């Protein structure tokens, strides 16, 4: 009983430590500049909900949201689809060169992302893809593939071969066995990939910044950075409101899919 109480206290402490910065930002987003400088750690004297309207309208968040939503959705669907199909091939199909390709995928994980920015930028420039959605989506899809393929390969490889053999005996082909029998069993891993890709693309700044010079193509991370640099123009309250607007979608996605994320981690720990 005492041990459980200590564990509950530790978990509660970690939860408070994690949530407090978000709560602090929300409180600052409802203050005037005068209130912010007078009392940064207390409750607002008056809740200024108009800061959110200012951030959304004057800082052009509607455009940033539309751009980010399109890029994130396309990158998520494309990246996860590639990872699922390639992971199935590595996990359940024996073909020549499979081991060598797996090693190559693993080696790519050791390459720091900043190292790839310059060559990818020049490739996009030569292909005329700067300031385009395709110029952002392609690299985002490629960024999840090495890790995603290995995760899906591990998930498919952990499924009993008897399932595939039974399906084939019942007349299922390779494709039908894949999407009707095996794929539904890997949904926790797929959900984990979706979370990682969504958060990675939604909050990514560096590539979105260097691949676009047109403000109409800015994603929400770039737009938020531009707004923060003009905090004395918009005011501190609207800037903090913009931070909340930027974060709320990621939080909601994680809350909705967290049970699958935890399930995938638990299955991985058991298999390991």
Image (cartoon, rainbow, N blue to C red):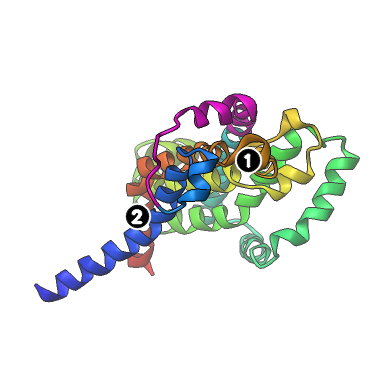
Residue 164 shows in this picture:
no
Q: Secondary structure at mark 1?
A: helix
The 10 Å Cα crowd at callout 2, few under 14, some 14 to 19, many 20 or more, is some
In this view, the residue in front, 207 or 222, is 222
Residue at point 41%, 39% (across, down): 252
Identify the residue position indicated by label 1 in the image: 224
Residue 4 percent across, percent down from the top left: 15, 70
Q: Quadrant of the N terminus?
A: bottom left
Identify the residue position indicated by label 2 in the image: 262
Q: Are marks 2 and 1 in contact (CB under 8 Å)?
A: no
Q: Quadrant of residue 272?
A: bottom left
Which dot marks residue 266?
A: none
Q: Quadrant of residue 138?
A: top right
Residue at point 58%, 40% (across, down): 239
Residue at point 57%, 28% (across, down): 54
Q: Is residue 37 left or right of residue 117?
A: left
**Lower position in the chain sequence, tag 2 or tag 1:** 1
Q: Nearer the viewer, mark 2 or mark 1?
A: 1
Q: For the magenta stretch, what is the residue range?
A: 42-71
The reply to whether the magenta stretch includes residue 261 is no
């Amino acid at each position: 009983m005492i041990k459980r109480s200590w564990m509950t206290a530790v978990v509660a402490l970690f939860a408070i430590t994690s949530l407090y910065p978000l709560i602090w930002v929300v409180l600052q987003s409802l203050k005037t500049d005068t209130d912010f400088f007078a009392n940064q750690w207390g409750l607002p004297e008056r809740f200024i909900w108009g800061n959110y309207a200012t951030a959304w309208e004057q800082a052009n968040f509607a455009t940033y949201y539309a751009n980010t939503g399109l890029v994130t959705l396309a990158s998520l669907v494309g990246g996860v689809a590639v990872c699922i199909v390639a992971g199935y091939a590595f996990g359940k199909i024996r073909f020549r060169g499979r081991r060598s390709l797996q090693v190559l995928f693993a080696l790519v994980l050791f390459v720091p992302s900043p190292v790839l920015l310059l060559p990818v930028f020049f490739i996009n420039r030569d292909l005329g893809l700067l300031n385009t959605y395709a110029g952002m989506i392609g690299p985002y899809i490629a960024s999840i593939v090495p890790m995603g393929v290995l995760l899906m390969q591990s998930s498919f490889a952990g499924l009993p071969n008897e399932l595939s053999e039974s399906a084939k005996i019942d007349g299922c082909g390779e494709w039908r066995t894949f999407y009707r029998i095996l794929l539904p069993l890997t949904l926790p891993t797929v959900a984990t990939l979706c979370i990682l890709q969504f958060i990675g693309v939604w909050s990514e700044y560096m590539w979105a910044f260097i691949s676009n010079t047109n403000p109409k193509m800015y994603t929400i991370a770039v737009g938020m950075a531009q707004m923060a640099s003009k905090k004395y123009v918009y005011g501190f309250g609207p800037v903090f409101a913009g931070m909340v607007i930027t974060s709320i979608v990621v939080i909601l996605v994680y809350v909705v899919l967290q049970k699958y994320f935890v399930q995938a981690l638990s299955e991985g720990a058991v298999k390991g």
